[in-house]
Image (cartoon, rainbow, N blue to C red):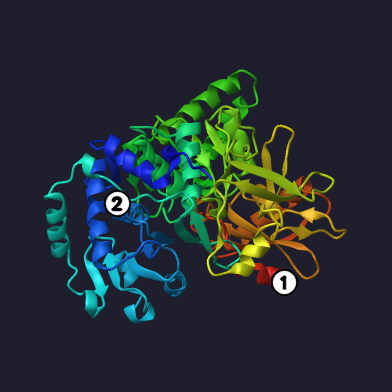
Amino acid sequence: MLTDEKYNLVKRFENSFRTHWDLPAVTDWGTTKTLTYGDLATVIAHLHLMFEENGLKKDDKVALMGRNNSCWVATFLATITYGAIVVPILQDFKAADAIHIINHSDAKLLFISDNIWEGIDLEQIPNVKVVVSLNDWHPISQHMEVSHITLFYIQKQFVRKYGGRMTREMVHYDERPNDAIASINYTSGTTGFSKGVVTPCNALAGNIKFGVDDIKIVYPGARHVAFLPLAHAYGCAFDFLCCLAAGGHTFLVGRTPAPKILLKAFADVKPTLILSVPLILEKIYKKMIVPQITKAPASWVLKIPYLDEIVLSKIRETLIQAFGGEFRQIIIGGAPLNAEVEAFLKRIKFPVSVGYGMTECAPLISFTPCEDYKTFSCGRALPGIMEARIASPDADGIGEIEVRGENVMYGYYKNDEATRLTFTEDGWLKTGDLGLIDEDGFIFIKGRNKTMLLGPSGQNIYPEEIESKLDNMPYVSESLVLQNKENQLVALVFPDMEAADANHLTEAQLEEAMEANRHALNPLLASYEPIVKIKIYPHEFEKTPKKSIKRFLYTSMADEVLSR
């Protein structure tokens, strides 16, 4: 447990508001709205008064659902500094799932974007006393006994308490130890079963300590483009909490993070650090780099020693400028980076590294900065914060990764059985991921325990590794490898229709291209891993907010592939 006061989660933000009072804290990118640290502290003071007037007690739950914006940030910080427990809900969750989470978490207050609220009825969430808009703070709906709580009323209370203007000296939050609960985050994994992760203040404090104090990836004046959903642990911890604990400036992108939008945001903000999921970088690689290196004369020059360095350095500089030109490194998380993409970025000395984490660790387990990073790994376990081991390794050293340390959750909310199954008898968290740890302590992920398949003689098959190869082949946007009842491997492919249309491919020609891909792919695989058929899937695969495919939605389709 991090008991030193300088690592106390609540005090850390109290000190940050006071120290960085006049610096910009958050900007709603694409608008003129920017809040300084002083502005943010003032909004939080108003929210604390709203909490008090609504009878919110310490450790009560406040649900929070909406797109990235300054209101979302203020509500999250107001909740944890008040001593209540925040329940972030991913905005992509369907209304029925959101209602279940609100009720299951016992939330008393709900802050929600107006457009999402349209699908929810107050009668469906009977324990919620007040619903507040994350668009402009107006009360969307409230029960009769608190109908007098208006924005005007709260402002009157603020004037009475602070004299109408808050100063940095007035920022003071009640003591809250790091062993208290900070949040309950409901997972959105690929298995379809959502559980409430009970996260202590200590876990968030551990992530902040590593990012701010240990490796100093954020600092006063640092600029971040927050396009990952803040309700997800990855974006929340580093684009938001670390950044604001250190005096940085977060630019909040509330729109769908398509590459075109992100490249515009990077050009505007010129971020000093970029956090991303693999899909974003892989799409930019396909659109910006692949066309340059596959066509003459560049494709010829890249085969000639010394001359290739000239071309590669120009590609590197183009890519760096596309991301704003001032970042120190790009950190990839949420899923493994495509091996071919990572190898090329390593070849051009592009500053990228891959970390490893999970919601149950708020989220970080391992990370090594790019200057010391080992290609294809996900770094070392965080020194002094997290430990990792391999349970029951096979002959190749591969087994389930287990972890323990400051960032680990308490368990799953109101689910003792799931909690019991997730921890070993000696207190290590079972990650559900398969991997190995090399002699230097670097962790290498092989795949998910639940997605691993067995070959004809019991060999371990990791579908993610096959998909990584297939995704780099012509006209493939994304793929999913499945196993049918005969233990044969088949693949669903969502095609790159933009490339297919550009080359005027007919439907029949696209199917021929996929068959050609299959013949090119199989020699790259082990003898027990051949793909017997590739079937074109007409839609993009449904994904979690961190852009992992929801495999459970498609496993039943494996037998259909060969029947057509």
Instruction: Answer with the quarter of the image where residue 159 lies.
Output: bottom left
Percent coordinates x, y for residue 167 in the rendering: 19, 42
Furthest-bottom residue in this view: 123
Instruction: Answer with the quarter of the image where residue 124 lies.
Output: bottom left
Q: Is residue 148 above or below residue 497?
A: below
Percent coordinates x, y for residue 551 in the rendering: 62, 63
Judging depth in this view, the residue of 326 and 61 nearest the camera is: 61
Which labelled disc corresponds to residue 559?
1
Mark 2 falls on what kind of element?
helix
Q: Is residue 164 above or below residue 126?
A: above
Query: Does residue 122 appear to the left or right of 39 in the view shown?
Result: right
Query: Does residue 47 appear to the left or right of 425 in the view shown?
Result: left
Judging depth in this view, the residue of 359 and 255 nearest the camera is: 359
Q: For mark 1, does the 10 Å Cα neighbourhood hold few (<14), some (14 to 19), or many (20 or more) residues?
A: some
Write down the residue under mark 2: 70
At label 1, the amino acid type is Asp
Assign the N terminus to one quadrant of the image. top right
